[in-house]
Amino acid sequence: MQVERQSQHPVQSATSPGPPLASSSRWRRLNAWAEHLAGSVFILPAVLVVLFLAIFPLIISLYLSLSRFKFVKGGFEIKFAGLANYRKLLVGSQQSRFLGVLAPPSPAGWLVFGIVVVLLLLSLVRYVRSGSLSIGGLFGRLVSSAVVSLGAWLLVRTLSAGGRPGTLVVTWIYVFVGIAVQYLLGLGLALLTTQRLPGRRFFRVIFLLPMMITPVGIAYTFRMLTDTDKGPFQPIWQALGLGLYSWVNDPWGARVAVMIGDIWQWAPFLFIVLLAALESISVEQIEAALVDGANRWQIFWHISVPAILPVSTTLILIRMIEAFKIVDLPNVLTNGGPGTATESLTLHAFMTWRALDLGGSAAIAYSLLFVVTVLGMSYVNLVRSRVTEG
Amino acid sequence: MNAIRTLFRRKSLFGPSPIGMMCSYLVLGIWTVVVLFPLYWLLVTSFKLPVDVNTGPFYLPFVDFKPSLHAWQYILVGDLSNDTIRPYINTVIVALTSSSLSLLLGTAAAYGLTRFVYRPRLGAILTFIGCVALAIVAINLGAPWQIAIIAGIALFILLLQTIGRRFKRALGNSDIAFWLISQRMLPPVAVVLPIYILFQRLHLLDTRTALIITYLAVTLPIVVWLMRDYFQTIPVELEECAAIDGASRYRTFWSIVLPLSVPGLVATFLFVLVFAWNEYLLALFLSGADAQTLPLTVAAQNATRGPQWWYMSVLILIMIVPVIAIAIALERYIARGLLVGAVKG
Amino acid sequence: MKSRIWMIVTLLVVVAMLAACAPTTVTVTVQVPVKETVEVPVEVEKEVEVVVTPTPEAKPFEGVEVNVLTFTGPQIAEPLQRRAPDFQALTGAKVNVTIVPFSDLYQKIVTDMATGTNAFDAFVFAPQWMVDYIVPGYLEDLTDRVAADPAIQWGDIAPFFRDFSATYGGRIYTIPLDGDFHMVYYRTDLLEQEGMNPPETWEEYVEIARFFHSKDLNGDGDPDYGSCISKKRNAQAYWFIYSIGSAFIQSQGTSQGVFFNTETMEPLVNNEAFAAALDVYKETTKYGPPDELNLDVGDTRSLFVAGRCALSMDWGDIGTLAIDPTTSVMQDKVGAVILPGSARVLDWATGTLVDCDETTCPYATNGVNHAPFAAYGGWSGGINAGAAPEVKDAAYAFFSYMAQPAQSNVDVTIGKTGFNPYRTSQFLNRQAWVEAGMSPKAAADYLGAIEGSLASPDMVLDLRIPQNQRYQQIVLDTAISQFLAGEITREECMQQIYDGWEEITDELGRDSQLEAYRGTLGVTR
């Protein structure tokens, strides 16, 4: 795996000079020194750039989330308010918009929740029994288990009859359902275009198109397309007898419309990355497997899947992090309506920010950050490490 | 019977059987229509008069409605032309520069993360953050920023030698990688104002430089994560051979590793380019009159009269033309066969 | 040793980066306090007379550059850009118009001034936003300049815009360029055919809508709609609810206000009047397009001028849109009328509706109380208090130039400019409108409706207290949207608005909010 060791802050100095040739010794020493620093040279520029733009905004926005913004004579004031913004989100006036309206869970809901809790307990037990137990690791797993089970409880209670999902739950729906469909679609298309079909280059370029349109433009395009009154699908809609109905009046219809736009837009991203991964599989491997008598399915399962699995997990992680920030489509298609049915977390934060409630907006953003971090870390620890190790 | 069997037999290693070919074409054809139909609709809308758009769906120019060039004229030649050319140039420059730089730095970092072991000490990191925070406070209290930065760095070096040494606990590669991707988790709306203030203090507002730096920082995590996985598929033996032959790390990276990961590079470059090309919120805040980019012009077509679909369609269409051209040019590099002979050699 | 080398490298890299980002030009903005001694621009008089015969030597602002920020047009931005060269020829001041997306204009202005960037010297924005800029002292007080400027013909501007919309706490802060308020539009041909009169009350409105719903109104064979009103979330719904409700709530003149109790700052939403308004708003959904919940005002007005609706509600745009052949097939079939009123109004003490008589409805016509709602306020020009003095003078001169009758009366007849009439003199010359394409009857109708609204002493001022966006866009709009979607009941809706508004008022300070609210209404105690 790793080729050589190189520490950031070595305590001892160990530069081996080159062969003692008088004329080129300095050149060799320079070379060796550059070689020694290679590790830092590779990673430092990127880290420094990200650091430069990361620290300041993070600290400021964290402080904003704990304060209240107000215009006063002479300018504005940012007054420290403690956890007031978070309290408003979780138990105060914004609760029904953020978390949703909770209703008693249905039997199916109880079942789902039970399964989730059992799985989490099993994984905790397995971790404790395994050899590599540590306090930090145990604490981390307890926190993420607690968060995941709370999330499942919220999901179950708001999606049952009488409940209404808030922006947090709606965002989860967008993310999980959207990514599942996008991944399968992208994988299917990549597999098809990796074959030696005449005209496959045409398809590959065409399939990239949705990704290249600016998200705001896509949102407006879909607003045109989903208009069942003057849009292109009006005849079909009328023919189905739905002329008097509109998807905008039904919360789930509106959510589906948003998800269709999202899937259309992002399937190309997964398509191109998976395609590159599939194209990186060496021909010799497959030839050798064929010679050994493997059939197509075995080749797919034993060669292709392991080859694309690391990239897939990264891809899903990246896509998940981006999907949580979905804002353009709900904003343009329905502005979060009907009611609050299609409002995502980022849209909630955006609307709050537009009304100059900077503290409230930062609080929502940090809640999103918390959820994504917990999910991301759990995902990385559970899935990626198992996939990429070895 | 034999004829049916030939239908299912594959023609070559990667070529499908005739049945497979038909099914593939069917599915691919359906998805092509799904992809192209919205674009067709945009094209048709750009030729419509407002009254045509509002009175119901018209599909075919000359058959259903009379096409008109008013939108194209307005955007490219008429009133808005000044506000189309300049954003267009800005978009091209900002997107190409930031994605090239991002690819360069990100690939280097990804290579570093897969081939080296980093152990940044926790103490060092905490002192660094502490000194940066102190510098920020000093700047906000009125000290000139050059002095504050230099003082911060000096303090950092000092503390590093003393306190930083005492904490032995260190982070690893995966922690650095996770930190990088965690930069993407916070929605831009929370950081837009602090970034605005940051660039305002640096007097870089309304410049392309500010946009390039911001896009660079924002896209680096993605480049690093994507390229990490592509690099992990490249066998280490190649580089060991090269090292034995006397090549330096840089040489190995440039001449051996990079050419082998061209498909991944191209895919990542396309994604990052598209991101910078289409980004809206940060561009809105960091730009004023000079550095405006095209997505702002597109969104601006939703004015008080309601969305002006015809202008918007024109803008969206002219926005995607250069990106498609680049995609066509680069698509051939996402091709199998670049690895042939590499391992054996 | 090695660690030291590494540290020096980091140091060098960091310093190099900072040096690269070093400012090449340092812009110094002069921060001037709000209440300063204003120089009276005597040159303005000279320059206005010069409108007819330009004299080349009168160039008082030679070399001055004014940066104006507004949103992407062509509405509002186009006339500014078109007249800027003329202004430069007259005064030597160069006016640069920067445009940003409409939905983000407010943020851009606030950020520019609050962070001290001051990249822009003047703005064309909605007066409803002005209180957020005045309280911190960002907006320049223009009272003295206006007083010394006879060319602007301040008295010609309709009283509402002159006395309420452009002022705060008795001082003038903006120059009106446009008049904004809601009216109801109807299909003259359809109503004439059925012998109906344009609706005077909201009950009549609903009746007419019910009658025409599902009939074919534009001859294309498909059923059309009775009434098209925007109900989309976070669009304009929070204004339209008050267009309906104002007639129920306000009857004693503009200074009464419709949003809060002027004694206690209690929201006026938990009463029969607001309930009646909610009922009407929801009722019209039954007679509208199936996706009306997702239509914003751009969609509804397009539908109306395409002939798909019998009734609609809008600002002045439908009038000018209807005569444009590229947008409308309803030329000469569109009529406008003052916002329907109510024969029963709110009794503030009891929260119930009482019948109209001389005391409860002093301004009623035919026993119906009308309260036209000046939603949004009408695009106006304001000046950044942090700009340099001569730039401020030049900016004022530019806005004065735009607002003067010679320019303004022409611009309001052109639909593309987005400027709607707001000066009394603009109604006297009907010929200009006929030349623009309106039939004499349509012009009389449209202008008559505007005149009637402007002349009404019971016109309703939009909410202009600090952070009004939170009251309207976050609390009111969300509750209305949820009510229309059926997520909450009418009582829950009113209670939710009440609680939400009280929470914001308490957070920001009840006394200061009350003072601000009374200040905008011109109420002094």
Image (tube, rainbow, N blue to C red):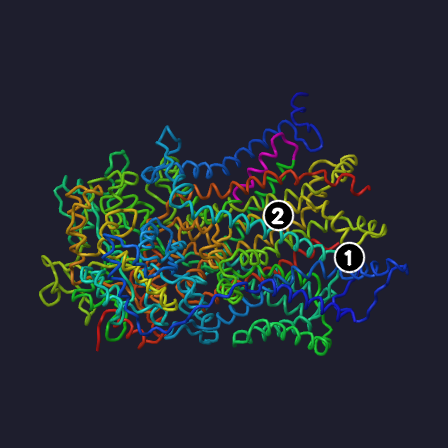
Q: Quadrant of the C terminus of chain C?
A: bottom left
Q: Which label is found at residue A2?
A: 1
Q: Main secondary structure of the magenta part?
A: helix
| Badge 2 element | helix
Residue C240 visible in image: no
Q: Which label is found at residue B269?
A: 2
Q: Quadrant of the N terminus of chain C?
A: bottom right
- Count of labels shown? 2
x%, y% of residue B326?
58, 41
| Badge 1 element | loop
The amino acid marked with disc number 2 is Phe
Depth check, mark 1 against mark 2: the one in front is: 2
Residue C212 visible in image: yes
The amino acid marked with disc number 1 is Gln
Q: CA distance from mark 1 to mark 2?
A: 26 Å
Region in magenta: A195-211
The quarter of the displayed image where residue C436 is located? top left
Q: Is residue B239 above or below residue B66?
A: below
